[in-house]
Image (cartoon, rainbow, N blue to C red):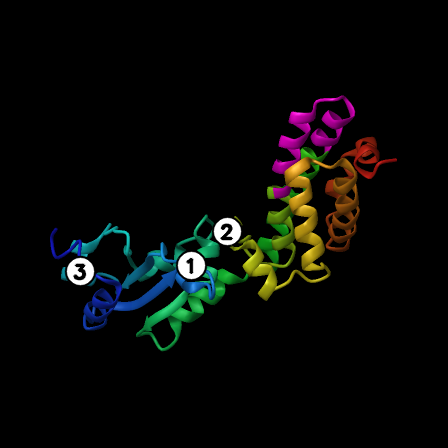
C-alpha cells in the first residue's frame, strides 16, 4: 500500500494547513452532523485553493479511501458549487476546518444555506405542482384499485413535498439520511416535527389516502399563504379529489 493510500484525515489537514495555496478546508457529511458519525464514517473534505495557485497537493485530486475523500477546487468553483445543485445541502451544514480569508469561507457556506426570496419562490412553484401531480395520481389509483401504483405515486409525492416545504422556508432540502437530524434542530415554521415525520412515514409506507388528504390540507394552506394559490387553482375540479370532497 502506498503512502498516499495510508493518508489520514489528520495528516492531510496538517499538510494542507501548511500550504499557502490552500485558502480553506471544509468538512461535509456525517462528520459535520453532530451525533451522526459511525464507525463507517469517512472524512469528506473540500480543499479550496486560491485562484491560479500552484500546489503539489494537486496529486491528491480525486483521492478516495475508506477514511478520506478529497475534492480539490478553486475558490471561484467553491463559490458556485451547489448553486444550484445536489451539493447545496451538504455545504449548507458543512463545517469550516480552515479559513484563511477572514471568514469568507464561512460566509460562502452561509449563503448556500439560505435561499434568496426569489430563489425560494421560483423553486417552490414547480415543486408544489409536482407534489400535486403525484398526490392526484396516487389518490386516483387508490380510488380505482391500483394499490401498488397508488403507493409508488404517494412515495414520489413525499419527495416533491419535502423540496417544497424547505423551499418555502428558504432552505435546501436535506438528504434523506439527515431529514430527522435537520428537523430536530431546525424545525420548519408552522409544522410539528413529530407529526410531519409521522405523516411522511405513514404515506411513504402505505400510501394511506386519508393521511395524504390530511397532509394536503396543511400544504394547501401553507402554499396559499406564501402566494402560490395559482398553482393549485390551475388543477381546477381535480382539487376536489385531493381534498376528499
Residue most toward the right? 245
In the depicted view, which residue is nearer to us: 236 or 211? 211
The structure residue drawn at horizontal position 23% and vertical position 52%, both measured from the top left corner, is 63
In the depicted view, which residue is nearer to us: 41 or 228? 41
The structure residue drawn at horizontal position 28% and vertical position 52%, both measured from the top left corner, is 66
- Above or below, 46 relative to 234: below
What segment is highlighted magenta in the picture?
A: 136-158
Mark 2 residue element: helix
Using the numbered discs, state the Cα–Cα distance from disc 1 to disc 2 in whole angstroms. 9 Å
Q: Please name the residue that numbered disc 1 is placed on.
A: 30
| Mark 3 or 2, closer to the camera | 2
169 with respect to 211 (left or right): left
Residue 208 place in picture, x, y as percent = 73, 37
Using the numbered discs, state the Cα–Cα distance from disc 3 to disc 1 in whole angstroms. 24 Å
Mark 1 residue element: helix
In the rendered image, which quarter is residue 186 located in? bottom right
Residue 140 place in picture, x, y as percent = 75, 27
In the depicted view, which residue is nearer to us: 92 or 36? 36
Q: Quadrant of the C terminus?
A: top right
Which of the two discs, 3 and 1, labels the residue nearer the N terminus?
A: 1
Using the numbered discs, state the Cα–Cα distance from disc 3 to disc 2 in whole angstroms. 31 Å
Which of the two discs, 1 and 2, labels the residue nearer the N terminus?
A: 1
Task: Identify the mark at residue 205; answer none if there is no mark.
Answer: none
The structure residue drawn at horizontal position 75% and vertical position 53%, both measured from the top left corner, is 222
Residue most toward the left? 2
Q: Is residue 150 visible?
A: yes
Mark 3 residue element: helix
Q: Please name the residue that numbered disc 2 is placed on.
A: 177
Task: Identify the mark at residue 57; answer none if there is no mark.
Answer: 3
| Circle 3/circle 2 CB separation < 8 Å | no
Amino acid at each position: 500500500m502506498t503512502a498516499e493510500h495510508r493518508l489520514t484525515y489528520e495528516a492531510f489537514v496538517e499538510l494542507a494547513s501548511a500550504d499557502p495555496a490552500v485558502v480553506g478546508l471544509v468538512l461535509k457529511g456525517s462528520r459535520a452532523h453532530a451525533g451522526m458519525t459511525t464507525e463507517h464514517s469517512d472524512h469528506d473534505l473540500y480543499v479550496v485553493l486560491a485562484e491560479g495557485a500552484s500546489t503539489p497537493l494537486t496529486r491528491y485530486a480525486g483521492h478516495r479511501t475508506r477514511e478520506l475523500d478529497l475534492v480539490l477546487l478553486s475558490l471561484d468553483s467553491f463559490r458556485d458549487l451547489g448553486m444550484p445543485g445536489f451539493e447545496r445541502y451538504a455545504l449548507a451544514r458543512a463545517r469550516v476546518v480552515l479559513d484563511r480569508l477572514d471568514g469568507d469561507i464561512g460566509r460562502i457556506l452561509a449563503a448556500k444555506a439560505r435561499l434568496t426570496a426569489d430563489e425560494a419562490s421560483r423553486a417552490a412553484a414547480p415543486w408544489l405542482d409536482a407534489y400535486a401531480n403525484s398526490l392526484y395520481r396516487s389518490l386516483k389509483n387508490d380510488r380505482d384499485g391500483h394499490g401498488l401504483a397508488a403507493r409508488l405515486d404517494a412515495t414520489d409525492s413525499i419527495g416533491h413535498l419535502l423540496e417544497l416545504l424547505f423551499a418555502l422556508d428558504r432552505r435546501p432540502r436535506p438528504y434523506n439520511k439527515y431529514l430527522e437530524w435537520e428537523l430536530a434542530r431546525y424545525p420548519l415554521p408552522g409544522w410539528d416535527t413529530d407529526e410531519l415525520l409521522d405523516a411522511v412515514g405513514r404515506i411513504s409506507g402505505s400510501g394511506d389516502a386519508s393521511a395524504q388528504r390530511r397532509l394536503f390540507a396543511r400544504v394547501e394552506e401553507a402554499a396559499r399563504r406564501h402566494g402560490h394559490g395559482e398553482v393549485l387553482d390551475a388543477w381546477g375540479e381535480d382539487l376536489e379529489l385531493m381534498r376528499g370532497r
